[in-house]
Amino acid sequence: MKAARIHPDFFEQFTCIADKCPLTCCQEWKIAVDEETNQRWKKLAPPKTVSVQKKALSEYIIEKDGERVIGLNPVHRCPFLSENKLCRLVRAYGDEVLSETCTVFPREVHEFEGHEEETLMPCCPAVIDLWRAAGTVQFPEVPGVGHDGDNEGEEMILLQIREQIIRLLQKEQKPLREALLESFYILLEFHKETLSEHFVSEYFSDKTLEELETAIREVEVPLADTIAECSELLQDLAVNYRKEGLYLCYLDPVIEEAEALSDGFDAQELTEKWMAFQSQFLQYEPLLRCFLQNEVFSDLVMPEGNLEQMILQLQWIAITCTAIRQSLFLKWIREGEGPLSYEDVRDYMVVISRMTGYDEEDVREYLLNSFETLVWDWGYFALIVGNGTVPKQ
C-alpha cells in the first residue's frame, strides 16, 4: 500500500521566479550533485557560453566537506549561471540535465514509517513571499496521530507533540517567544519521563499551559544579556562564511556593528533602541509565525528520530530565529534606525536559513562544540529567545 503523502496548504503554490529572484540559489552555497547526474555529465560538453571551457560537465564538480558539489567560480556563482540569472545548462539541454538538488529545491520530503511529508525550505525568497502574501499557513494532520491511544509508538507520540507545538505557534494572541519558551520547557519535562499520549495531552492542556504561561511571565531575563548573547551567537555562525567570502554584503555590516555594540551604548540607551526596533519588527510577526511553524513542521521530528533529537532541533530553530532577529536589529541600528523594510527581513531570513541549513549530525556536532551541554537548560533557551524584560530602574 502506498504511503500517504501530506503537505502544508502553500506547498503547491510555489513557483521558481528564476531571473527575477533577488537571492538566487545558484550563488554562495553548495549545490550538490548526485551520482546519477555525475555519470550523465561525464558524457555532456558544457555550453559554449560557459566562460571556462572544460571537456565535460563532470569536470566542474568538486569534493567539498565530503560531498560532491558544483565548483563555484571566483565570485562564488555557479559556472552555469548566466549574467541574467538563467541556467545555461537548461537552455542547452532542458530541465532533465539538472541534478536532483537543482530540480527539487526548495522542496523537501521526509519519509516516515506510515506517511511522507512535503514542505518548502525558507532558503528561497519566493517561499518567504508566499508566506507574506498568505498571512497564515495551515499544516495537515498526520494520519493516525492522537487517535485515542491506538498509535502509541514513539514516532507517533513525537508527531503528536509537534502538532501541539504548531498549535501553540498559531495562537495569534500568544507572543511567539512565549510559545517557544513553553514548548521548550515541556520538551525538557518530557525528557525526564516515559512518554505516552495521555502525558502529552496533560502537558498541552489549557490548564497546564495557563499555569506555565503565568510562571514564564514572572521570569526576568535581562535584556542587555539577551542582546549580547545573540550577538555572540551570530558572530560564531558567521565566522566560516566570512572566511570563505560568502554572504559578505549581508554579514560584514552586522558583524561589525555587533563588535562595536558592547562599547557603543549604555544599558538604558540599548534598551530604548531595542524597544524602538521591536515596534518596527512587530509588523512582521505574522511572517515570522509562518516561518517558525514551517521550521517546526519540517525539522522538529525526523524519520527514526527520538525526543533528544527533537530537543536539539528546537534549540537549532531558536538559534536560527534569534540570528535573524539580531541581524535585523544590528542592520537597523547601522542604517539609522528608520523603517524596517520587508526586503531586508526576507533577505536575512533567507541568508540565515541557508547558513543554518545543517543536517542532524552537523547540528549535533555544532551544539557539542559550542555549548557546555548538548541539551540546554531552560534558562539559556530563555536568554537567547528573550522574554521582553526591561531592567528594573
Image (spheres, rainbow, N blue to C red):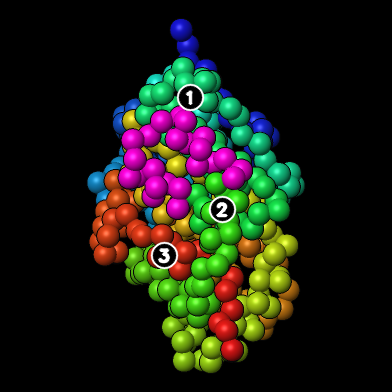
Instruction: Please state which of residues 254 and 96 is positioned toward the viewer in this rendering.
Output: 254
Looking at the image, do the residues carrying marks 2 and 1 touch, with CB atoms under 8 Å apart?
Answer: no
Helix or strand or loop: what does disc 1 sit on?
Answer: strand
The Cα–Cα distance between marks 3 and 1, rounded to whole angstroms, is 35 Å
Say whether disc 2 or disc 1 marks the residue closer to the N-terminus.
Answer: 1
Furthest-top residue in this view: 1
Queried whether the magenta region covers residue 108, the answer comes back as no
Instruction: Please state which of residues 125 and 376 is positioned toward the viewer in this rendering.
Output: 376
Say whether disc 2 or disc 3 marks the residue closer to the N-terminus.
Answer: 2
- Is 201 situated above or below 20? above
Q: Which residue is mark 3?
A: 379
Percent x, y for residue 258?
A: 47, 80
Q: Which residue is mark 2?
A: 211
Say whether disc 3 or disc 1 marks the residue closer to the N-terminus.
Answer: 1
Q: Residue at 29% across / 56% down in the picture?
A: 374
Looking at the image, do the residues carrying marks 2 and 3 touch, with CB atoms under 8 Å apart?
Answer: no
Instruction: Please state which of residues 339 and 104 is positioned toward the viewer in this rendering.
Output: 339
Instruction: Report the mark closest to the observer, 2 or 1.
Output: 2
Q: Which residue is mark 1?
A: 116
Which quarter shows the C terminus?
Answer: bottom right
Q: Residues within 10 Å of mark 3 (few under 14, many from 20)?
A: some
The Cα–Cα distance between marks 2 and 3, rounded to whole angstroms, is 18 Å
Q: Residues within 10 Å of mark 2 (few under 14, many from 20)?
A: few
- Is 308 situated above or below 23? above
Q: Which residues are magenta?
A: 185-207
